[in-house]
Amino acid sequence: MPLPPQQPSRPLTTVIIGGGIAGLTAALVCARNGHRVIVLEEASVSGGIVSRHTLGGIDLDAGAESFATRSPRIPPFLKGLGLGENIVSPNPVGAWVFSADKNGKKHAAPLPKTGLLGIPGNPLAPDVRRVIGLAGALRASSDRWKKPDSSFDALSLGELVRRRLGEATLNQLVRPVVGGVYAADPDTLAVDSISPSLRAELRKTGSLTRAVTSLTARAEPGSAVRGVIGGNYEIVRAITRELLQNGAEIQTNHRALRLRRRESGWLVDDTFAADAVIIACNPMSAATLLSGVNSELVPFTGQPNSTRIETLVVHQPLLNSAPRGTGVLLGETHGLVGAKALTHLSAKWAWLRERLSPGTHVIRLSYREDASQTTGGEIVRNVDPGRALLDASTLMGVPLNKNTLVDNNAVTWTQWQVTPESVRSVRTRVPHYPGLGVTGSWVTGTGLASVIPGSIDEANRVCQTALQEGK
């Protein structure tokens, strides 16, 4: 008869540095493992990019407003939070892709239905040719008969697509989708993080388009994203509620600056003694903390990317027909439009549409910002909506101006880029330090479908090592 697992002589303490969705998820796992949990969050509220604001009397997501279906682990996780019945699918009409040439000639077309991250499974399909043109489609279709080559080892998604399918597919499909959905550059996005199964399927099938066809055939029918009634912030609320019920402490306005090893366990800011520490903050802050442990753990960070999201609440009945589906992804516009993507939120989500008065709509536009001049996560009221209204009008093909405006604001989010090689190095070395974990979008990949499972796995690993050390 096997012996029951040994329990530590006292409750283990875990400090989570960072109270975004990665840190909260890791904290929840540790709390469910019986740990005493302390979350240290630099901002005045927890949740990170999964945040909330109120416009026109309606509570809306200020950051991520959906999650990808590529991970089957999200629905069970949400069900465990009591949100299983609140998972919803978006309007199936889908999004459009918009571009303009140097002469200002506009081109708008529905986003091809079958694909992965904008990568088409059948480049010669009519809806793909309508976006990238015949020449681009022929170049991409050559992937089917090209032999496997060194491109299969490409670390970034951009390099892989460029070499296998060509610039037209990368710039007119993949870049708009990745930029609009993930607020990321495919040239800095690690293949293994954004789609963990893509490389294996690539090697199995021998071509990128065949790999995409295989993966999409196995995917759940319908949209590639889901949402939660009331917005993604309901996930933060549910996690926070359970954490507090389990006796966890969430300390906001606390920026952790120092981390060092003790003979047994860890010490944060010379104040918090812990059996385990999980770093779930941005890579710049993580680098400062990890440098106090060993310089070999410090991630190599590049220039950060900042995205400003401008949200407009407008009264314009002409939008009732959802003329651009659930939104618009942007290719090259040669300056005609400043926005990088547009989401017609009230067309995308039925629950939101039902909460608005007839003829009222919610539109979000995203813009690139100079990261050196921004403060991530700061909601700014009374922003001049002139450019956003002009861009929205151009993209939607419907007149929108200050006379149609009900309310608006803006929030800027900053993402620090880490090289794929550096991510791999950190993930390989951290397990050699018992009780230490690292998570967050720069480690797991962007999007809730990557961050939540990655944080669950890392927290479970850390709990296991801390248990072994605490026996």
Image: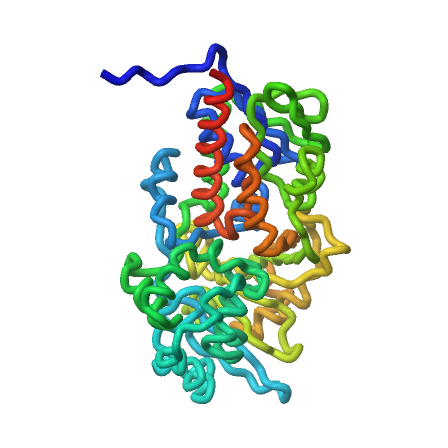
Apparent side of residue 121 relative to residue 372 in the rendered image (left or right) = left
Q: Residue at x 39, y 77 (%)?
A: 147
Apparent side of residue 179 relative to residue 144 in the rendered image (left or right) = right
Residue 278 drawn at (x, y percent):
56, 33
Location of residue 93 with respect to 57 vertically, above or below: below
Apparent side of residue 250 relative to residue 73 in the rendered image (left or right) = right
Q: Residue at x 67, y 33 (%)?
A: 293
Q: Which residue is drawn at 53% across and 63% down?
A: 156
Location of residue 337 with respect to 268 vertically, above or below: below
Image quarter hosting the N terminus: top left
Q: Which of 142 and 281 is in front in this view?
A: 142
Residue 57 drawn at (x, y percent):
55, 46
Residue 152 drawn at (x, y percent):
45, 67
Q: Is residue 18 visible?
A: yes
Residue that extends furthest to the right in the rendered view of this protein: 373
Residue 222 drawn at (x, y percent):
31, 60
Location of residue 350 with respect to 328 vertically, above or below: above
Q: Residue at x 35, y 67 (%)?
A: 211
Q: Nearer the viewer, residue 262 or 223?
A: 262
Q: How many labels does the image show?
A: 0
Residue that extends furthest to the left in the rendered view of this protein: 1
Apparent side of residue 227 relative to residue 399 in the rendered image (left or right) = left
